[in-house]
Image (cartoon, rainbow, N blue to C red):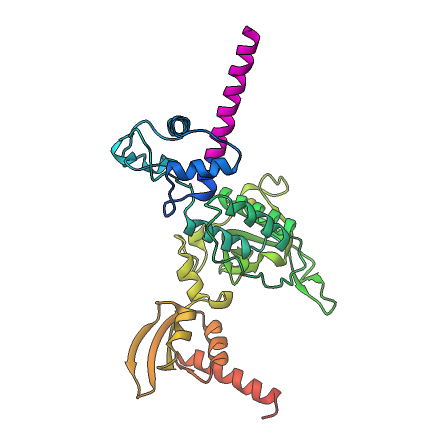
Amino acid sequence: MQSEKKSTSKSNQTNSIIRAFKILKILKEQTDKENSMTQNQILDKLKAMGDTCDLKTLNKTLRVLIEFFNPIHYSEENRNSFRIIFQGYSDNKYKSRLTNIYYNHEFSYEEICNLIESIQFSKTVDTKTAKIIIKKVKKLINTQRSIDINEIERVPEFSTIRKEELRENLGIIQKAIENKYKIMFYFNGYNHNKQLIKVKEKKYLVSPYYVVAYNNRYYLISNTEPYNNISIYRIDLMTEVESLEGNREYDIKKISARAKKEIKALPVIWQAQDFMLEHMNMFYDDPVEIRLKVKNNTYTYIHDYFGDKFKFKRNVDDNHDIIEITCSPNAVVHFSMQYSEYVEVIDPLDVRNMVIESIKKMCKKYEV
């Protein structure tokens, strides 16, 4: 008889635990701040899952879950720690009948969308793996809610470097930056056989400072021995990357990264947006102030490339304005050639002459 009672008690306990997991699953997968549930709605969901408990049992189970997942008392400091939300929770009112119940997911809908976009555009994650990760990430919010960026397709990637190697290189570089050590690597380019080949047989020796993502590629902002200016390298074109940390072939001065203040035009305090706007398309010559004559109906193009950093100076006529930007001269030459119908470099004269020389070379090439 006692054995039967123990068996029944154990069975009831097991059912209670299973029921609690079912309720938690319902709340996690089908509720959020915009989509709460009443206890009757939860009961209907439970019945569909084969659990026929009553309101009293449900209410009791909900309170157990609330006690386990939520802080004892509400305060502004701990409000984000509450996982199971219900009407009156912020007033510490645990009414006899809980209602407007939902699960407070750790990631918001907007944050999940940002995560998915980051995964989709990552250069270190292949398409197949990205789909698997995204499927898992979507489970972190109400699964009944659609993700608007479902249909974004990844653009074909033509780099032949293995994703594992790129990820490993990034790890080596980041560690070297943190510990202030130089790195060595081969820098490569593509040949007519679509293969990566070394630009030169000797490894590059650089002091690494920052890694940036630009146009879906990773770049290393660094200084190359023995020069004093900035160097920029595409990380997916780097192979056999090694940190000199712990390398006993060189003395400590040789393996330690140079101080940022020693490098010409290198920001000591990193402002990624400003740097990228001044080094458009990753040109690394020193940025200067440049005046452009632009058509006044093409500011969308200007904003696409220079954000809100360009300065309006004056009107020229009904159709043209003068603006000022701070940017790499080589980058501006390429920009002005690309948008020659809308843009004219006014000064400095040496930058204007660079454009003129580019035009002459093009005319000669096309026998104009």
Q: Nearer the viewer, residue 339 or 221?
A: 339
**Where residue 38 sits in the image (x, y, percent)?**
37, 39
Is 140 placed left or right of 154 in the picture? left
Farthest residue in the right direction? 193
Please indicate, yes or no, whether residue 201 appears anywhere in the rendered image.
Answer: yes
Please indicate, yes or no, whether residue 224 appears anywhere in the rendered image.
Answer: no
Q: Nearer the viewer, residue 161 or 130?
A: 130
Up-down relation of residue 215 to residue 1 (above or below):
below
Quadrant of residue 103 within the rendered picture: top left
Is 192 placed left or right of 45 in the picture? right
**Where residue 266 sits in the image (x, y, percent)?**
44, 57
Up-down relation of residue 368 to residue 75 (above or below):
below
**Where residue 156 sits in the image (x, y, percent)?**
62, 63
**Which quarter of the image is occupied by the N terminus?**
top right
Q: Is residue 360 magenta?
A: no
Farthest residue in the top direction? 2
Q: What segment carries the magenta color?
A: 1-23
**Where residue 203 sits in the image (x, y, percent)?**
65, 54
Is 7 placed left or right of 73 in the picture? right
Q: Residue at x 27, y 31 (%)?
A: 92
Quadrant of residue 349 within the rendered picture: bottom left
Q: Nearer the viewer, residue 2 or 353?
A: 2
Counting every numbered tag in the picture gives 0
Farthest residue in the left direction? 91
Up-down relation of residue 115 to residue 192 (above or below):
above
Q: Residue at x 39, y 40 (%)?
A: 104
Quadrant of residue 68 within the rendered picture: top left
**Which quarter of the image is occupied by the C terminus?**
bottom right
Q: Residue at x 42, y 66 (%)?
A: 278
Magenta highlight: main SS:
helix
